[in-house]
Image (cartoon, helix red, strand yellow):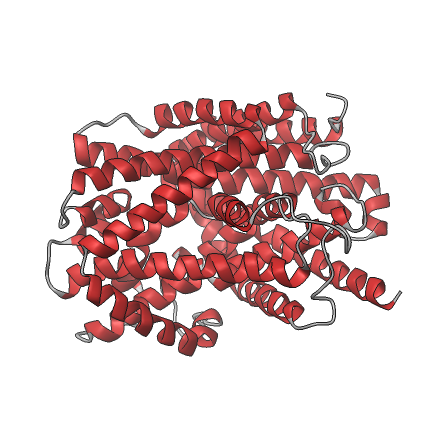
Amino acid sequence: MNNLNKSRFFISTFLLIAITTIVYTNLSASSAFFSSTQLLLSEYLGWLIIIIANGFLVFSIYLVFTKYKDIKLGGQNARPAYSYKSWIAMLFSAGLGIGLLFYGVAEPIGNLNDYPGMIEGNLSYNAGKAISLANLHWGLHGWAIYSALGLCFAYSSYNKNRPFRVSSLLGSYVENNKPLAATIDIIAILTTITGIATSLGLGASQINGGLNYIFGINLGEIPIIVFITILGLISVSLGLDRGIKRLSQINMTIAGLLLLAVLLLGPTLFILNSIIQNAGVYLNQIIQLSTWTEAYESTVYQNAYTLFYFTWWFAWAPFVSLFIARISYGRSIKEFIVGVLFVPSLIVFIWMGVFGNAALYQVLNNIGDIASAVSKDVTTALFVLYDSMSFSLTLSTATLFVIVTFFVTSSDSGALVASMLSSKKGADIEGDSPLISRITWAILLGVLAGVLLKAGGLGALQTAVVIFGIPFSIITAFACRELYRSLDDEFNS
């Protein structure tokens, strides 16, 4: 408790409890508010979201080729605290996890169904476009957000000895202005909790949908969230090395086995050919796709897909970026960006290439009706894919298990980060954030996810992400500007 920053902790918890109470006691009005707010923000600020997302990608790639690329996080004598294997496993599990399992099949099929630029009757073109859009939403742009902010956190904390807090990234003026610094940190905490609650809601929906589809069991999302929250409490109490690190390694192992199984049991040659072709299509269209703003037409796609995904990455940024910074001591700037930006993006491309193309193969060859299944209930998309494969029950059971472990990893990682943000020192390299704080945030994560699901389902989760993600993206842009100034000062000193 000695390291607890009472103002940040209690104001954040009060605001979250107040928001949760208001939403829970006004479910119908809250649902209408969420729907109208998302449309309003997307209509008037969509162009800004697009600019900022592209800006982070340009900034991250640029740093790899600058004179600052060999600066080490922690000083030139610093040595990495974790092996490459553990490092990649932890950042990938925290950074994606449930999202890829939920959308690995549903996203490409959803693009095929909803993207307005599809050419009727040209399934080959449309399939390539569907995967390219999935790669846009889950690949370089999202990881560039984590890379840029993560580097800000790591350099500020390890090279300038500042606390692991967002306010520490914005220069001495903000840091010395205590009310302003506290406000920024509270926004970061609320953004973190909301972003992770969205993923927990998705995970609970997919677990319930899977149980119902496979075994005919309908537990409901709320009991599942309660169960996972309890597991998260146990993991977060064990700490980083005994809890999150081990779970992350389990996640990556099982996810890798699922990937291999779908590749071998599915249309293997088609998938391999498609991955190569998809890479060319994505690289050829990345500028066009990433700057599309629906200027000359208005459809539901941009709001429901691209803008939502980009703001979801913004909302997850304080959580994942701080966590990545926390485990990246001793890495050089170039090593950090390559590891955080390019390696996970490559994994995403392979994942979408295997699962997405396995699903698209069924559409192209009239196997089953996975397109209708996705439109009817997106939570069962992955399990419908397995129906056409051998060992479908084994695959489905293993998927449910890994969703749970990803779920727990997200919960305890988020609780740890929120605790660090609400600590006096932001928690040092040994992670001395108070246990009571971590437990409180783990519980609030579960409560908020459950209430948002009750208030409007996945739509409410999406809107909460947009509301908090947009302002935090602007804060991140200023943090990147301060980082560049600091790097230049160090190099020239």
Image quadrant where residue 449 sits: top left
Task: State the image coordinates of residue 488 (x, y, percent, origin top left).
Answer: 80, 66
Q: Nearer the viewer, residue 134 or 121?
A: 134
Rendered residue at 63%/27% (across/down): 14
Q: Is residue 81 above or below residue 445?
A: below
Quadrant location of the N terminus in the rendered image? top right
Q: Going by the image, does 123 lie left or right of 188? A: left
Residue furthest bottom in the image: 284
Rendered residue at 41%/44% (across/down): 252
Q: Is residue 171 above or below residue 3?
A: below
Q: Going by the image, does 304 lie left or right of 432? A: left
Q: Going by the image, does 312 lie left or right of 70? A: left
Rendered residue at 75%/38% (across/down): 182
Q: Nearer the viewer, residue 11 or 348?
A: 348
Task: State the image coordinates of residue 100 (x, y, percent, origin top left).
Answer: 38, 50
Is residue 1 visible in the rendered image? The answer is yes
Q: Nearer the viewer, residue 458 or 90?
A: 90
Task: State the image coordinates of residue 85 (x, y, percent, origin top left).
Answer: 50, 48
Is residue 31 visible in the rendered image? The answer is no
Q: Is residue 321 above or below residue 365?
A: above
Task: State the image coordinates of residue 71 (x, y, percent, origin top left).
Answer: 74, 61
Rendered residue at 41%/38% (across/down): 250
Image quadrant where residue 184 sits: top right
